[in-house]
Image (cartoon, helix red, strand yellow):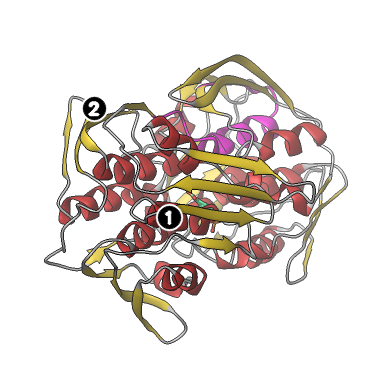
Amino acid sequence: MNAISSDKGTSPTGLTGTLTVPGDKSISHRALMIGALAVGETTITGLLEGEDVLATAAAMQQLGAEIEQKEGTWHVTGRGIGGLIEPAGVLDLGNSGTAARLLMGVLASHDLTATMTGDASLSSRPMERVMEPLRHIGAEFTARSGGQLPITITGTPSALPGDETLKVASAQVKSAILLAGLNAAGNTIVVEPRPSRDHTEKMLSFFGADVRSEENTDGSRKITLVGQPEITGRDIVVPGDISSAAFPIVAALITPGSDVTIENVGINPLRAGLLDSLSEMGADIEIKNTRDIAGEPVADLQVRASQLKGATIPASRAPAMIDEYPILAVAAACAEGTSIFEGVGELRVKESDRLAAMAEGLQECGVETAATEDTLTIYGTDKIPGKIAGGVTIASQLDHRIAMSYLVLGLASENPVTIDDGSPIETSFPGFLGLMNKLGATMAEAT
Ligand code: S3P
């Protein structure tokens, strides 16, 4: 446990500078997994070297893929679809829901048995949502009661193609079914209630698979993957993670005088809902140099301190910004007027119960909030002096985004905000503290 404190600092110029953030976590996991299933060598530059992704790399090695890092580039020699081997030991996915759920899909159509485990946070997260559709294609699972990790999966070499209509818009569940479908004869079909991030579809196409998406008139989306494609090694460039950029973005918006540019950020529209929400709240964010890299849209973002106002964020936007609600809650706490986040029940089953973590932690810092099972209301303070009192220690609950969100709130609070444990930040944003301090923040180990 290393406690970290963040305070207002005294710089009249606020946060300034140009930076890049680490590679996109979702794309990094997928690059390693799909690279391990492709024939030949895949190179990956810009891979997120955070604990979550390193857990995926270690698991793919245990499953027989050759993976090494040379001078900043990752080289993956794949085994071909269906070619992974039974691991000798347990696969430890640490804190990573994406690693665990996507890997279940990969293994579901392999002729092997493997056991997965994770930390206390991952071992309390729901896995039935992914096991159920994978059972339909022939995989078998033994799980702890409640369908939680540790879980043993026995895959099948003769998987049936999936045909699933999902209840939740979950990119992890969708991706698990599609990855299982790589080794099934025939078309795998997934219908999601609302479009969720499409990195798996984009990357499978980039590797040479036939994946098609159709939007339905009711807002749902149907994805069809043709099974047993020839996928061959590719050169992947991972853009900066918008979910990590979110922290310096909101930090700059709420710190008077700030002017920060974040270069090379992935702005896939199914991930960039935060930018729409902040813009509705009055944020000054310029999207510059939009370009396409390895099948993903990328841009530079210039962010200036702004007078924010409250907004109602509709449930329909949740899939496009699901990981950004904790930091948006910090922006809302600093805004003038009330913000309402609708249809955010999924936040309760993330690395922590993020709805409760924000509702309760903000209250402790002096910001009024109200929560229902799937709504969060934040009564903005307009940063009126004294309103965000701070001076408290918040439990980060093995949740990187809760930890970083409260450190950003410290920039706008009267007294420092401390998190009890900064180590979860390593899962997604190695170097966070150094980078924020370089911009002018004051974040340091608490004494
Ligand atoms: C992710 C999907 C989302 C997101 C997670 C990463 C992915 O989870 O919260 O951080 O890479 O597919 P759900 O699929 O549970 O919504």
**At 48% across and 46% down in the image, what residue appears?**
225
Examine the structure image and report whether residue 83 is included in the region drawn in magenta.
no
User: In the figure, 154 relative to 214: above or below?
Assistant: below
Depth check, front residue: 350 or 100: 100
The residue furthest top is 289
Label 1 lies in ligand 1 vicinity (Cβ under 8 Å): yes
Residue 415 in the image: x percent, y percent?
62, 49
Residue 112 in the image: x percent, y percent?
21, 67
Depth check, front residue: 50 or 395: 50
Residue type at numbered disc 1: Thr
| Residue underneath mark 2 | 73
Mark pair 1, 2: CA separation:
22 Å
* Disc 2 crowd, CA 10 A, few/some/many (<14, 14-19, 20+): some
Examine the structure image and report whether residue 256 is included in the region drawn in magenta.
yes
Residue 151 in the image: x percent, y percent?
33, 75
Residue 23 falls in image quadrant: top left
Mark 1 or 2 closer to N-term?
2
**At 50% across and 59% down in the image, what residue appears?**
173
The residue furthest left is 88
Q: Quadrant of the N terminus?
A: bottom left
Residue 398 falls in image quadrant: bottom left
The residue furthest bottom is 145
Residues drawn in magenta:
238-263
- For this view, does 416 lie left or right of residue 228? right
| Residue underneath mark 1 | 98
User: In the figure, 129 relative to 29: above or below?
Assistant: below
